[in-house]
Image (cartoon, rainbow, N blue to C red):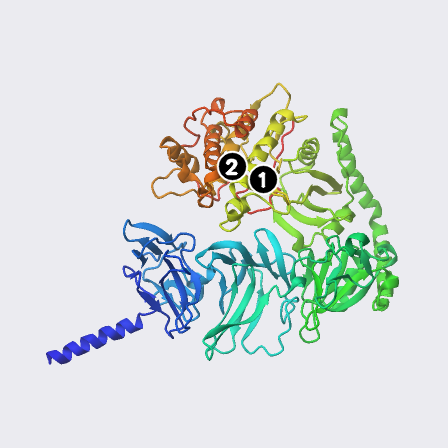
Amino acid sequence: MTSLFAVMLVSTYLTALCCALDTILPGKIVKDGDTIVSHAERFELGFFSPGDSKNRYVGIWYKTVSVKTVVWVANRKVSVNDTTGVLELSSSGILSITNNTNGTTIWSTNSSRSVLNPIAQLLDNGNLVIREKNDDNPDNYLWQSFDYPTDTHLPEMKLGINLVTGFERYLSSWKSSDDPAPGGFTYHLDPTGYPHLVLRNGPIETYQTGPWNGARFSGRPKLSQNRIYTHRLVYTKKEVYYTFELLNSSVFSRFILSQSGEGQRWTWVYRAQSWELFLKLPTDNCDSYGRCGAYGSCNIGNGPICGCLDKFMPKYENEWKKADWGHGCVRKKPLNCAKLDGFHKYSHVKVPDTKSSWFDDRMSLRECERLCLKNCSCMAYSNVKITGAGRGCLQWHGDLIDIRELSGGGQDLYVRVAFSDSDGSNLLIILPVLVSTFLLVLISACCLWQRKKNRLHGNNHIRKLSVKSKTQDLDLPFLRFNAISSATNHFALSNKLGQGGFGPVFKGILQDGQEIAVKCLSETSKQGTNEFVNEVKCIAKLQHRNLVRLLGYCVQGEDKMLVYEYMPNKSLDLHIFDETQSMFLDWPRRFHIIDGIARGLLYLHQDSQLRIIHRDLKASNILLDKDMNPKISDFGLARSFRENETGANTDRVVGTYGYMSPEYAIDGLFSVKSDVFGFGVLVLEIVSGSKNRGFVHRDHCHNLLGHAWNLHRENRSVELIHEDLVEDSLHIQEVLRSIHIGLLCVQQSPQDRPNMSSVVLMLGSDGELPVPTQPGFYAERNVGEGEFLSYADFNYSANVSSSSLLEGR
């Protein structure tokens, strides 16, 4: 009887063990050497060492594939240096990797909520999830590895972006076969204009798939007998993502981003016991992004591979003959929108880059043609979906780049040309266009006088304000409303860059090809004409390489707009606070940004025609041009002073917590030293990669300033430096000096802070620095990360927002 009871106990234990092979329970640990296996034994999780490395990582690999193939790595940035690492799930649902020797946490998950009975489970699709024990609804997962891909795209995994939260899932290559840390290549689904997959080497685009056309991405080859997988793109108001699913669950297929920057799809062949390359991207030289320039077309079967589209010719014939195709092509006959242009059809092509595009998936192709013909900025159109009879309207505004000819696949593209070069396919719509134009003119005539009165009222108001002093005349172009409307495709949502308290901001392209950002005054804005004019006058007088340039303004009736130069690399906060983008900011680039901001502030405080105090210096208000040069933007809160004035006080404190000086936030006193404080905060954020507001440390409750101050006093400032910069021993002294200067700028008393001329001198020399005193807001206050004092203005990012009310003197 005892023997039987023992057998039953052992059997029950083995059954329980078997059923729990794919899970980790709270308090249970997975030691180095232990593994968990998914229910159908497709995937396995445990510690491993990549290549010839001795370092240990927690990863997921195929269980039944004889060649160990890792598809996901947890602690890819920080390894365990020996075999003492353990993987453990806490009672609150946090999964962490710990060095068992010293108790150091190497890696951990995050979650905004907790559950009573958490478990970590490895699913048969390779997804490691943390969930409530009795709740297997994917929408309720606390955390999942599919949200944090490494270099491998697995079936059912999403690549894309949450349009509500901005959270993105993308691939990043390994540094090497021995190091799974993020390398230089990334693979994203870019939703700009119309969704397409993009391969980047750092910030540089090297390959685009072309837009999704309902069956595949436009630039991918047509697979006539693909019996391995199906793929699709999902686009809703909440999210946009690309995914694929296997047609046969017994097949193993994966897409990886290699260390050399190739996208590769591999399929496991059981007979050969090896991975077979199914396809790779880029496939040839024609897949190099923008290889043949604007209106150029690449054909890998031709020699040379680049040619101009029919009806086009090289922009620079001599350079073209030397295989320098970068300047692209131009039309043989110029367009004349006023007299009606036409379209020429190009078949079996990868359609152009869709960054400057607009789409409507409900419109017919004929309606799309008619709409494009009416809009002089519309350069081409095509179907959104090519499946069935085709449907939807996709239009391009601006030069057409990254076109290639495909012998199989591709789709039809209709490019705007002079009417004499057109296919004549639009002859049937000439009469409706002329009729609609006549009706439009007739209706416009009925309202003409009222519109003129409104426009004159707005312009006269501008003139009355501008002529109050002959020294304050607006030295700035007045742009016509029609020109701005055409440049932004009539303020299409696809061109919208963001929304602030002033109103929406749109990207546009002027007729001369210049890219612009248009800030529109919305009806709900608290700003009026007086503030608008003051801002125009203020910024129009500022000319410096480290200040964003105002190109013009427009007033028509109640519509008021400011037109700025467009900054392709957007705002600084998107780079220093983003885990991936920050990797491409080495110390020389960060120091270049710090120095540029300092020189821009020095100009505002000392060298400009007006003495300007910015009052809202922060990471989201530093824009970066194509060469990563910093430019201070958003002068909505700026105050101008006479030459002998240095500051003032106000009863209306507006700005952004975390960057405001103590004397301004508490007492309303502001001066040039207020900007110096904000600059100091920026320096510490650029060095550390952490935000001042919302900074959290396990050992104390100080903000970033307090943390930096404590480390400085203990001669441990090197611990503040971002992990990607620590190994840069060549510049370590310059980094530490920058921290020291940042602490000098954020001192509690304004009198103790240096002026910007001293800051620029300190940044450019190796002289001895003063000893900093305690920073402002040393004792951390209980204010949430998202709190701000007022409403947002001209921002390219979703950073903490601020007001933009200018009070001129």
N-terminal label among 1 and 2: 1
x, y percentage for residue 647? 57, 23
- Identified by mark 1, the residue type is Ile
Circles 1 and 2, Cβ within 8 Å, touching? The answer is yes
Could you tell me which quadrant the N terminus lies in?
bottom left
Mark 1 and mark 2: Cα distance apart in space: 10 Å
Residue appearing at x 65%, y 47% in the figure: 505
State the mark number for residue 252.
none
What residue did someone put label 2 on? 682
Residue appearing at x 43%, y 32% in the figure: 777
Secondary element under disc 2, as helix, strand or loop, is helix
Instruction: Categorize mark 1 by other alpha carbons within 10 Å: few (<14), some (14-19), many (20+).
Output: many
x, y percentage for residue 542? 68, 31
* 491 left or right of 186 in image: right
- Which is nearer the eye, 544 or 586? 586
x, y percentage for residue 3? 12, 79
* 681 left or right of 131 in image: right
- Which is nearer the eye, 9 or 393? 9
What residue did someone put label 1 on? 622
